[in-house]
Amino acid sequence: MFGLDTTLTILLFVCLLLACGFEFINGFHDTANAVATVIYTNSLKPTVAVVYSGLLNFTGVMLGGITVAMGIVNLLPAEVLVDPNPYHGVAIILALLTSAIIWNFGTWFFGIPSSSSHTLIGSILGIGLSFYFLPGDFGINAVNWDKAKETGLALLISPLLGFSASVIVMFIFKRIIKNETIYKEPIPGKKPPIWIRMLLWITCGMVSFFHGQNDGQKGVGLIMLILIAVLPGYFALDNTVNLQSINGNLKEVSHLIQKVDSNTLSAKEKHAYFDLILQTKNFENQIGNAFKASELAPSKRFDLRRDVIKVTKDAEKLISGGNINLSNKEVKLVKRQIKEMKKLVDYAPSWVIILISICLAFGTMFGWQRIVKTIGEKIGKQHMSYAQGASAEIVASLGIGLASWKGVPVSTTHMLSSGVAGSMVAKKGLKNLQKGTIKTIALTWFLTLPVTILLSGGLFLFFRAIL
C-alpha cells in the first residue's frame, strides 16, 4: 500500500483506528451535554434526541472547515511537524491518541463531564515537552507556546463565560417571560409548552451543530497528522492548489521581509529572517515549472511542505517580535500572503471529513446516558426547569459557535455544564448547587492537563524508543 513496508502499513491502520475511536468516544462523551436539556425537560424522547443530535453533529463537521483542526495541529512547532522520519510521527500519534482515549473513557465511565478538547491539548503539550528528554536542541521549544497560551486562555475563560452568561440569560427570561410554568420542575411524562419545546429543540440542534464544527475538526486534524506522518508524499500538499501562485506569495513575503534591517533583530529573529529567505529560494527551485503537487516526485512534496511551514512560522515570529520596521500596510500584506500560503498545507480531503463525521455521529448515539444523568440531575439540587435548560443551551451554542468562527478550540462540556450551574445559581443562589458534583467536575478539570501531559509524554518516549 503506497509502497509502505508491512510494519508501517499496520501502524497506519492502528493509528487511523485510534483516531476514529477517539472521535467515537468524543461523540457520546461530549454530545451528551447537548441532549441532556431536551431529555430532562421532556422536550424530546431520548432516542429521538440522540439521533437528532448525531445528524447535526455530522452536518457540523461537514460544513465546519478545518481552521480549528489546524489550530490543534499547530500546537506543535514547525520542527516537529516536518520530521521526515515516519516512525517518529507514528510515535507522536500513538501517544497522543492513547492518552486522550484513556482519560476520556475513564471520565465517561465515572459519569464525569470532562472536556475532550482539554484532554487533547494536554496530550499534545505532553508530547512537546517530552522532546526535552531526546537528543537534539528541541528542549522547551518543542511546544508552540504562543498557540498554547491562546488555546489555554480559551479553555480557561469558557467555563467562566458559560456560568456568568447563563445567569444573565435567566435574569432576562425572568424579566420578559412571566409564565411561571417554565421556571418549575417538569412534570414527569408531560411535555412543556410548544414554544419552549421549539426553543429547546433549536438550541440543542445549535449546540450539536457547533460541537461538530469545533470538536469534529479536531478529529480531522488528527487524521491529517497521521496521513502526513506516514504518507507525506501523498498527503503533505493539497493537489488542487497552484504551486506557482504559492511561489508568488512566498516571494512577496520574502521581498517585504528583506526590507527589514536585520541589525535591529534579536538572535532568534535573525535566524528566522535568514531561514525565511533560504526556504523561499528552496521552494522556487524545487517546483520548477510545475503547477500541481502531482507533477512532482512524492519525495519532493514533503520538502515543499516544510518550506511553506517554516516560511509562515518565521514570518509570524518576525511580525510578533515587533522589531521589524515595516508599515502597518506592509504587515497586513505579509499576513494576507501567509494566509494564502497556508492553503497548500492546511487542508483535508473530503473522505477524511466524511469519516470523522460518521464516527462522531455514531458515537453520539451510544453511551450518552452516564453524562446526561450528571448534567440533568447532579449539578443542581433541583430537577432542571425548562428555562434553565434553554438558558444553558443558548449560552453554549453561542459560545461554541463564536469559537468555531474564530478558529479557537473550546470545550462543549465546559460551556454547557457551567451554563447549567449558572442557571441553577440564578434561581436560588450557590446553595442550589450540589457541592460534591461541582468539586468532582472542578477537580477533573484541574487534573486533566497534568495527567494527560504526563501520560502522553511517557507514552511518547516509550513509543519513540521501540519504533
Image (spheres, grey):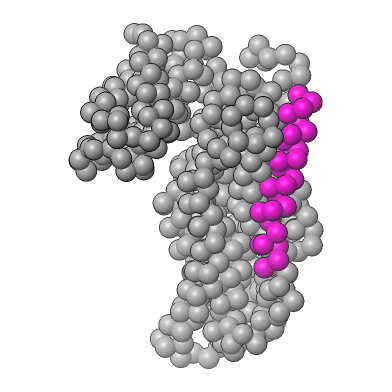
Who's the residue at 64% across and 41% down the image?
129
Who's the residue at 65% across and 36% down the image?
132
Q: How many marks?
A: 0
- Magenta-drawn stretch contains 448: yes
Where's residue 452, x and y in %?
70, 49
Residue 357 visible to an observer of this rendering: no
Who's the residue at 53% across and 48% down the image?
148
Q: Say whether residue 81 is left or right of residue 464.
A: left
Give whichever of 302, 404 is nearer the camera.
302
For the magenta stretch, what is the residue range?
442-467
Q: Quadrant of the N terminus?
A: top right
Where's residue 426, x and y in %?
54, 84
Q: Is residue 167 above or below residue 79?
A: below
Give whichever of 228, 24 is nearer the camera.
228
Residue 384 visible to an observer of this rendering: yes
- Magenta-drawn stretch contains 409: no
What secondary structure characterizes most of the magenta part? helix
Who's the residue at 48% across and 52% down the image?
150
